[in-house]
Image (spheres, coloured by chain):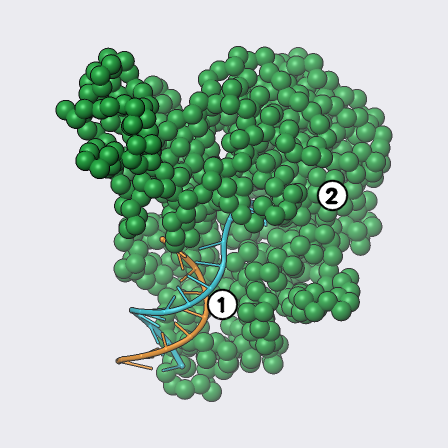
Chain colours: A green, B cyan, C orange
Amino acid sequence: MNLSEITNGLNDKQCQSVILNNEKNVLILAGAGSGKTRVLTRRIAYLITQKNIRINAILAVTFTNKAAVEMRGKLSILLRRPIQSMWVGTFHGLAHRLLRTHYEKARLTSGFQILDAQDQFCIVKRLMKENNIDESKLPIKKVQWFINNQKDEGIRAQNIDPGYNYFVKKNLEVFELYEAHCQINDLIDFAELLIRSYELLKNNTDLLNHYQARFEHILVDEFQDTNTVQYKWIKLLFSGNNRVFCVGDDDQSIYSWRGAKIENITKLCTDFAPIETIHLEQNYRSTGNILNASNALIAHNTNRMGKSLWTNASNGELIDIYEARTETDEADYVISSIQKLITDNASPSDCAILYRSNAQSRIFEEALIKYNIPYIIYGGLRFLERAEIKDALSYLRLIENSADNVAFERVVNSPTRGIGNVTVEKIRTFAQDNHTSLFQAAIQISSTLPTRSANALNGFTKLIEKMIDETKYLGLSEKVANLLNTSGLMAHYSNDKTDKAGSKKENLKELITAAQQYNHEQDSEMNEVLGFISLASLDSSGDTNALINQNIQLMTIHSAKGLEFPYVFLVGMEEDLFPSRQSKDEPHLMDEERRLCYVGMTRVIKKLSLSYAIKRFLHGESLYPCPSRFLDEIPSEYLNKIKAKFSATKQNYNADNTFNQNITLKSDGQLSIGTSVKHAKFGLGTVLNFEGQGDSARIQIKFKQVGTKWLISSYANLEFV
DNA sequence: TCACAAACCCTTTTT
DNA sequence: GGGTTTGTGA
């Protein structure tokens, strides 16, 4: 492979970034759509093919699993050879790999399990209950948040001095209990993956030396979203003899709530000096209007590092702003617009609906089903986070390792088999007192229980033993298929009356497919079952890329980061929704909301549509939100305002929330949308819409000859036809 | 002691 | 609207 293949299609700045010599570290400050991921990929290809760097000497960190998969794919095409042994992945994925490889030095056993947010919540909750800490005073979510925040900062319970702060003291108390619980039970949560692998390297000089020497080039994407531990992790791996190459954009930092520090970009410049900084400001993605509008929006933020994107592309179409009556009207508008695009030969996968919060997806999902358009929703309750799937995986875990207490608790009475809280509590106590697993405790304790409970419990332990025995020599997917039947899960969910669509049963079948498709080669540190379970925790999307091709894509703006679409519908542009209500009192949070809006807008290649509803049903009540402030921050020259067919101001609703389609003009006359009228000058027409009541009402009329006009009722002198 | 139904509470973003 | 907790009946 020659150099021109690598630099093919790159502009001067991009090219310069790719072929920089090895003497300095590099920071690429790259705007949205300026090709930063492309630069990162080409840089790796350059190092390998032109500088003879071994595949093993590369460490490439991305932010999402999606991005990692994409980069792997691009690299293997570019390099025309397998790259299995290259370390490309998310911080969490790579940290996990380190811990699996060196589990003993990390004070773990080989079968350690990853806790997802749900598992973590349950454990915190139980610990608080057991220790009589009142959750009404100390909400579990807050404690969970406290623990994760500390860990993201690299702080452990022992490092915290609560002083006289009561709440810190209480939080700390749970934190300590939680840390002890996780250590005893071999459990690792997401933040722990990072902090533990950091400590692993820090406390084992020989290991650190090994990896420092091995990773000659460390490349990090989305650097603005690294948190404190991640930054320290990179810094630790940097020996001075190897090189880092970081890519980031301060305007796209949208994860500060998860501990991400924009300041890491500036810190990088001092900690990793000498460092060469290159700005990529030419945008290749969007049209002029979209780019100018986005620039105008983000200019409202203070404390920017400062850059302005430009493009050679033409202005393109204006940005549509649609004022919907209600959230249903908004969905109808979006879906019918998409239908038009598809009729005009757009692929459904070219269209994306982006929103601030997952809860907004439901209404669009319903509309898409109604219109029979195929779609795919990212995020929300992800496939592998669904209850039925977690049940099945817990059986798998328990069969693999009967000492897996988290799995035991989950399935001991699921499907229900008469083992209630009282019995489980006895098992817990026994296990704790005798330092044994819940499973062993259950076997030993059953003779002391009332007959009914004892029988139920014996049934369960026998079942698990039988499953262990039966599946011993089966492959992963056969194991899954077997356990679904033997455990009774499949039968249970097949009979589930609340699951009308039968989707739970379908999901379980899908899990067998997922097990079949699982590619074990990438996680060769682990056995197959363990690898599959870990993957399920780290990448809970359950995505199979094949699905994307023919589907409309729905996702939060957060998950759209790094992606691009020809047509984007950015919906729910309302105060308290976007920007979110919890951000409005804090300027730095508001700035982050604005960056999020900027990220959303800059995903677009061709055409952007924004929309908001005048009336929205949210959290169980009707609201009349104001349009988002971000809409006002976009200069109107880039916008094309569209109103609903039947616009709705607040007064157009009756007391019972039905939409009032009638307008009273004078005491004697009333007309409705759709009524035919005659105007002295404009001739015959039909009422399309109105605002207000009485003489001051504005009425929109579509005239046969002169088109659509807004008229004031007192001047119009309309005649009924 | 357990299962199911009704009331009750909360409501952002993700690895 | 949905997940969780509480209350009731078996």
Residue situated in front as seen by the camera: A591 or A674: A674
Looking at the rendered image, the quarter that the N terminus of chain A falls into is top right
Residue A242 spot, x, y in % from top left: 80, 34
Residue A355 can be seen, yes or no: no
Query: Is A56 situated above or below A493?
Result: above
Residue tagged by mark 1? A408
- The answer to whether dots 2 and 1 both sit on one chain is yes
Chain for disc number 2: A
Residue situated in front as seen by the camera: A375 or A596: A596
Residue A449 spot, x, y in % from top left: 44, 85
Q: Residue shown at 19%/34% (left/top)?
A: A669
Chain for disc number 1: A
Q: What element carries label 2?
A: helix
Q: How crowded is mark 1: few (under 14 residues within 10 Å), some or many (20 or more)?
A: many
Specify the amino acid type for callout 1: Phe
Residue A79 spot, x, y in % from top left: 62, 24
Residue tagged by mark 2? A231
Direction from residue A233 to residue A270 in the image, left or right: right
Q: Residue shown at 50%/78% (left/top)?
A: A425
Nearest to N terminus: mark 2 or mark 1:
2
Callouts 2 and 1 close, C-beta under 8 Å? no
